[in-house]
Image (spheres, helix red, strand yellow):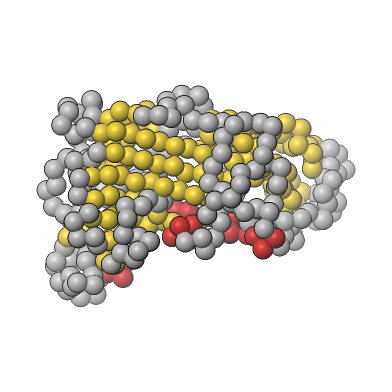
Amino acid sequence: MTIEEEKSTRGAATSGAVPLKTASNRSPSSRSSSPRKFAVIRSTAVVDQMCTLTKESHSTLNYITPHFRAEAEVQIGPLGEGEVYTIGWVQAVTSMVFTNTYPTGQSSWEIQELNTGETVAVSDADGRKYPWYGITTECQTVSGPDPSHRRIKVLMNDNFSPTVSWAVPVGRDQPDALQRVHRDQSFLVWLIAKNEITGAIQPLKAYRWRAIINIAVDCSREIGQRAKVLEPKIQAQPLELFDLRIPQSAVQSPRANEAQKFVWRTRESEMIFEVSCNPPLPPTLQPCLSSSSFSSSSLSSLSPSPSSSSLSPSPPPSLSPSPSPSPSPPSSSETRYCGSSIRYSPY
């Protein structure tokens, strides 16, 4: 799922590739009927030049990454009667590796559609109003009639602040054994103008950015001294793209937080435990024989295929609590869990 990276005169970063030049991946509404209504006066995209921070508690490691920040000032031309446009930022995940390594296995957050190549990008909208990354500072709506020229400013920021369990996240009373945290996630970000009447989308700017986090962990040390951030300690700057076309999947559901799954791969039995969860899964999953806070259909135990038997990584999820009609003991094809009081946060 890699292709040659887009070239740019700005920045030096590269990230997971998305074949935006493939006609089949273009949004059918990617052209605006009024391409001259909008002029980008100024647009910037940067990643804070600071190191990832770590916080250690009794049960979890929390890391906070530098922020990606995008800001733009757009001039809007005269609008006629009934014209309504929203201008703002859209973000999509294009690749994600998010693994936590323990002596007995590896946990990860995964987006299956990206791993299999079924799609090239998954919307990172906040879920309140597609396709926007947010609906406060991230976008603005203007309407006609208005014969004047006006300017608006839209800005967004993004970073990660997940918590990771020291203990193996499957089973009861596991010792602290976390060894390594690795995350490599890539995004495409567009500044767009959307015609709210026709749905037509006009891309105005596009950026690619990537976050790589490597943390070594020594659980034999005291709390507060266990985690060490490895290279790259300073993240690369975003890359401005010349190809502005948007894959349809980047502006529609499902969004990343709905598409992601929590996966545990054990080294000993080579079994894969996969959980779709919303809200996010707790850091310690405990087998439950008599009751479960999650529907049995939300969790399955899978035998690894040749492509999944290795300890390969992936992205975040969501768990829908639903009462189980009649709890039954787990079989070889089904394992059920209930969560502890500690919440796991993929972001």
Above-or-below relation of 53 to 243:
above
Residue at image location 19% in from the left, 41% down from the top? 177
Residue plotted at (78% across, 54% down): 32
Residue 284 visible, this angle: no
Horizontal arrangement in the rendering, residue 314 relative to residue 240 (left or right): left
Is residue 147 shown left or right of residue 345? right
Horizontal relation, residue 129 to residue 278: left or right: right
Q: Position of residue 202 (x, y in %)?
A: 74, 50
Q: Quadrant of residue 12?
A: top right
- Work out whether residue 311 or residue 324 is closer to the camera in this orientation and state it: 311
In which quadrant will I find the C terminus? Answer: top left
172 vs 321: above or below: above
Count of numbered badges drawn on the protein: 0
At which x and y percent is residue 193? 72, 48
21 relative to 6, above or below: below
Question: Residue 170, percent across and down?
Answer: 20, 53
Find residue 74 and report its image quarter.
top right
Q: Residue furthest right?
A: 147
Q: Residue placed at 32% from the left, 52% from the top? A: 311
Q: Position of residue 129 (x, y in %)?
A: 57, 53
Q: Residue at x 23, y 55 (%)?
A: 266
Residue sticking out furthest to the bottom:
326
* Residue 214 in sight in this render: yes
